[in-house]
Image (spheres, coloured by chain):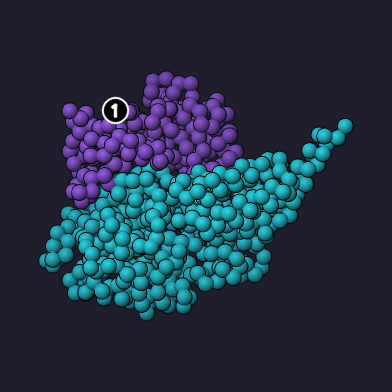
Amino acid sequence: MNPLRERYGSEIDNVLAKYPADQKRSAVMPLLYIAQRERGYITRAQLDQVGEILGISSTDVASIVGFYTLYHDKPEGKYRIQVCNDLPCALRGADKFLRDFCDRLGVEPGGTTADGVVAVDGVMCLAACHRAPMFQVQSRTEISYHEDQTVDKAMQLVESWRQANGQ
Amino acid sequence: MSEYFLLRNREIPNIDDLVIYRQNKGFETFQSAVTSMKPDEVTEIVKASGLRGRGGAGFPTGMKWSFIDKNNWPHYVVANADESEPGTFKDREIMESNPFQFLEGVMLCAYAIGANAAYIYLRGEFWQLAAELDRHIEYLERENLLGDKLFGTDYSLRLYTHLGAGAYICGEETAMLESLEGKLGQPRLRPPFPPSFGLYGKPTVVNNVETLANVPLIVERGAEWYRKFGTEKSPGTKVFSLSGNVEKPGNYELPLGATFRELIFAHGGGIPGGRNIKAIMPAGASSSLIFADEKALDTPMDYESVPNVGAQLGSASVIVIDDSVSMDWLIDKTVHFFAHESCGKCTPCREGTYWMRHITERISHGQASWDDVILLNEVANGIKGKCLCALGDFATEAVMSSIARFRSDFETKTHAAAETIEAKVSP
C-alpha cells in the first residue's frame, strides 16, 4: 500500500482532477505539499510514494524537490522564518533587521535555534516591498506573511510558538 | 486620480465580496459575452483598446489572443500570478482586494480563445491567497457562473489554481508552462510561442494578472472609452508599485504617461530624511538604473518614453534610490538575486551570474581594483543576449548601467581598496 494515498486519498483525487487524465505529472507539486505536511520535509520514502501515484520515477520527483525552494529534504526548525532582504527591502532596513533578529535568537542566518523551534534565513523577494521589514513563516501546514516588522514584534511571535510548544 | 479601474477596492468597499462585485455590474459582461457575443468579437474589442501586457514585456494583449492556433485543440489560459520581481507587489493587491474582476478577466479571455480550462499559477508564497481564490472559484461554481453549459449555452469553463514553490524563473511564460506540467521550471526554446505550442503542447494564452484585470471594463465600456486614459501607444491606467527610499511606498494606480516626479513626489511623498534622489529603477531589480535628474523625473512613465532615458517601463515597479546608496552595494544585491534565481539551463546565465556575484562581492567589500570593475562589465557583456530567456539579460542591466552612469561610485570604492592594500604592503 502507498501510505500517502492511504492517508490523503480523497484530497489526492481532488488534486488529480484538476489536470487532464493523461497529464498526471502536473500534480507533482501539489502532492509534494501534501507530503511535506507530515514532517515539514520530504522523506526518501515519500519521493517513491509520490512517484508511484503519478507514474514517474523517484529521481524525477527528487529533481522537483531540489529545484524549488519551498520543498525541503531535511528537518530544520519547526517554523522556518525567511526574512526578505532583497534590494527594495534592504533599502528599508531589512539587512539590519535580519542581523538584529538573529542576534536576539542567538543564531547565524541559516541556523536553527537550540530548541529546534525556529530556523531563520534571508530569502529572495516576497512581493511585499512596501511593508519591509517583513518575513514569511513556513510551517508544516502553511505559509504566512508578517509585514511591517520590528525585532520586538518578531520575538513576540517566536515566544508565542515556544509557549504553544510547552517551553 | 478620481477614478480607479483596477484598484477599485479603494473606492468600493468590500468589492472582494461577490455580492458587492455583482451589485457593481460584476459578471454581467462575462454573461453577455457568452450569451450574445462571438469569441472573436471579444478579442477584437481587446485588440482595439490597445491594452498591452502588464507583466513587463508590454506585448499587445488582443494580438496575442488572436495568434491562438484554431486548428489545434483544446486551448488553455494560464494566468501568470507568479509575481516575484523585486519591487513588484501589484498583482497581489489586485488578487487580494479585487479578486472577482481578475477572475472575470480570466473568464473573458478563456471565452475569447475558446478555452474550457484556465489555470492560475501563483507563486508558492501566495499560499493563503490561493486558498482564498479557491473559495471564490467554488462560490462562482455554486452561482453557476463557472461550470458546464453556462447560461444555457454550450460553453463550459473551469478555473484551477496551481501553486509554484519558490522560483523566480517560473514567471517566464514557458518556464511557467513547464512547471505546470510538473517539470523543472526552465524556459523553452522559442519559437514556437505558447499561442501555438503552450501547455501540454496545446495553444495557450499566458497573461499577467493585471493585464487580465483590465479586460472586464474594456469589454463592458468599449475600446474607445479605454483609450481616453493613458497615451496613444500605452492606453489605460497602470498600477505602479513604488518602493525603496520613499516616504509612502505602495501601489498607485495612475494613467500611463504620468511622470516619475508625480509618482515619487506627489503620491509617494518624496525622499525621507532630507536626502536627495539619486537613481530610479523603473522595472524592479531587472531594470537599468536611471540617473534621476530633472529630465528623468519629468519623463512620462509609458512604454515609449522610458527608453528615452535609458531603461524600460517593464512591470512598472519603481524602486527609488537616495544619495546614501553606493551602486557597488546595490548591484551586489541585484546580482545575488539573479545568481540565486538562474535556473541553470543556459551556460552564460548560470556561470555568468555566479562569476558576477563573486566580483560584486569583492567590489562591495572593498577588496577589488578597477580591473575587477572592467572584468565585471565584460562578464555581463558575455551574458547579454546569449540566453533562452530574459533572466540573463535582466541580471546585467543594473550592472552595466550603473558602471556606465555612476562610474564615480566604483572609482571611489576601488581607490579606497587600493589605498588599503598600499598601506598594508608599505613597510
- Decide: is A88 above or below B1: above
Chain letter of the residue beneath label 1 in the structure image: A
Left or right, residue B222 beside residue B300: left
Is residue B64 at all visible to an observer of this figure? yes
Is residue B242 at all visible to an observer of this figure? no
Percent across and percent down for residue B46 are 34, 73
- Decide: is B359 above or below B395: above
Crowd class of label 1 (few under 14; some 14 to 19; many from 20; radius 10 Å): few
Residue beneath the point at 50% across and 69% down: B303
Please state which of residues B319 and B40 is positioned toward the viewer in this rendering.
B40
Left or right, residue B122 beside residue A125: left
Image chain in cyan:
B
Percent across and percent down for residue A125 are 48, 47
Which hue is chain A drawn in? purple
Please state which of residues B67 and B144 is positioned toward the viewer in this rendering.
B67
- Decide: is B293 above or below B82: below
Q: Where, by quadrant of the figure, is residue B113 drawn?
A: bottom left
Please state which of residues B358 and B28 is positioned toward the viewer in this rendering.
B358
- Decide: is B364 above or below B113: above
Residue beneath the point at 35% across and 44% down: B127
Percent across and percent down for residue B290 are 62, 62
Residue beneath the point at 41% across and 77% down: B227
Q: Quadrant of the N terminus of chain A?
A: top left
Q: Quadrant of the C terminus of chain A?
A: top left
